[in-house]
Amino acid sequence: MKINFISLGCPKNLVDSEKILGALGASGVAINSSPLDSDIIIINTCGFIKPALEETENEIRRALRITNSTNKKVYVFGCAVNRSEAELKEKYPGVAGWFRLGDKTKLLDAINARAAHIDARLPTTTGYAYLKIADGCSNHCTYCTIPQIKGAYRSYDLENLVREAYELAYLGVREIILIAQDTTRYGVERYGKPMLSSLIKEISKIPRIQWIRIMYAHPKTLTEDILSEIARNRKVCNYIDLPIQHINDRILNLMNRGATRTRIEALIKKLKDIKAISIRTTVIVGFPTENEYEFKELIDFLKEINFDWLGIFPYYREQGTQAAQLKHVSHRVIKERYNRVIRLQKRLMRQRLAQHIGRDYKTLIHGLNGNYRGHTAFSAPEIDAQVLSSAKNLKIGDFYRLKITKARGCTLYAVGTDGTD
């Protein structure tokens, strides 16, 4: 049996996909890169916002065109099914099976995978891997569908996570990237207190792991303990992903973010006291009732802080969320504000990346496509600036010292220096 697997959405979805692939591999099923030459196409979907649902539907239509008038089957799994199962079933009756997030074993049983109950994982990245430490969310931001899709926040067992990190290290992983919907909340509901720093300390004991990176740190749950761990633990990258979403207090309150401008500014000040810290954030523009003055406050704040990395999202009205009931900003205004932040960020990005030219950095090589592709401690793979190098005879999954020679867009170009780390 040959199976083609399509994974959509965020790194948290990717971890789910890798665990399904691990069970399939343990069952002796062949994973095929070509949907045309496969018996089954599995789509792990995303349903977070409107564009994600549109991408999911596009992939379903494409898969059904491939399997039309054949014995091939399409199975659809994951977030979009949790969110819109009835509507999707009605629109795409040709899909052979629909599986919600909790239906991993049912999906594997439908394929007759012998190892359906095995806890295995097949990493699809090289050199680095994501470690999902919790699922669900209990923050209930008014624009967000995650609690509807995934339920309340649930921390995973610490010992099991450390064991998984050991297994990933054995497979050649050198960087562990910690992810959850709210990574810094880890442990609160399971152990009665925040446990992220404890988890990091345990993972730091793994000899082969050299970098640990923290993503999705919520301003409400980021603690002094975590700040200290970043500052003192040599294995923790001086990097943090801190989604602020906005800076105006009225908008933050309408979003139910649980953090004020004062709180956010205090956190950023403490973070910038950490030597060579790199800060990523995300913002939403055009949130319901946002006026020009409040948007200008956000723009001015972004200019002042000059974040190292910035993700920008136009507001999408999502059915079933509290924000969907508020008075909406027009699509024209949302697009105009989005474009203004994009222009600002491009200008700031050129200035920041130019500062790296002439410097050499420890770089984890994670791919090869003509040039070697890698990333530094100050940039997360796939979402921040990647490093491209034409250096010779590098090994994917290893660290090298590379010297940055130029920056173009969000890409840094580098040449090799002697020796490896």
Image (cartoon, rainbow, N blue to C red):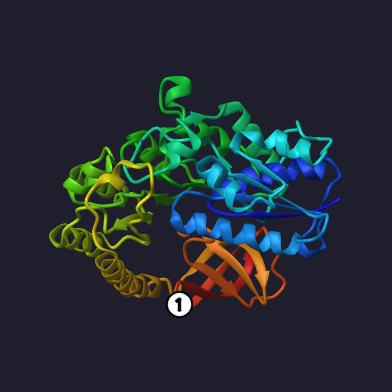
Foreground of the two, 220 or 200: 220
Q: Is residue 185 left or right of residue 402?
A: left
Asked if residue 73 shows in the view, the reply is: yes
Relative image position of residue 66 (x, y in whole percent) = 74, 64
Where residue 156 sits in the image (x, y, percent)? 55, 29
Q: Identify residue type, mark 1.
A: Ala
Question: For residue 321, what is the image quadrant?
Answer: top left
Quarter where residue 68 is shown = bottom right
Placement of 110 over or under 75, stated as above or below: above
In the image, is 239 to the left or to the right of 365? Answer: left
Task: Provide residue 72's location: percent of width, then percent of height.
Answer: 80, 55
Q: Height in image: 394 above or below 305?
A: below
Q: Quadrant of residue 286?
A: bottom left
Relative to 267, 121 lies left or right = right
Identify the residue under disc 1. Answer: 407
Residue sitting farthest toward the top:
192
Q: Name the residue: 75% across, 38% down.
A: 108
Residue 293 against residue 346 in the figure, above or below: above
Label count reads 1
Looking at the rendered structure, the secondary structure element under dot 1 is: strand
Residue for point 37% across, 72% down: 355
What residue do we see at 42% from left, 52% from top?
239
Query: Closer to the camera, 221 or 316?
Result: 316
Query: In this orientation, does residue 364 appear?
Result: no
Q: Choose between 384 and 14: the one closer to the eye.
A: 14
Q: Please, is residue 120 above or below residue 37 in the view? A: above
Identify the residue shown where x is 59% and y is 38%. Answer: 101
Report x, y in % for residue 22. 74, 43
**Callout 1: 10 Å neighbours few (<14), some, many (20+)?**
many
> For the C terminus, which image quadrant?
bottom right
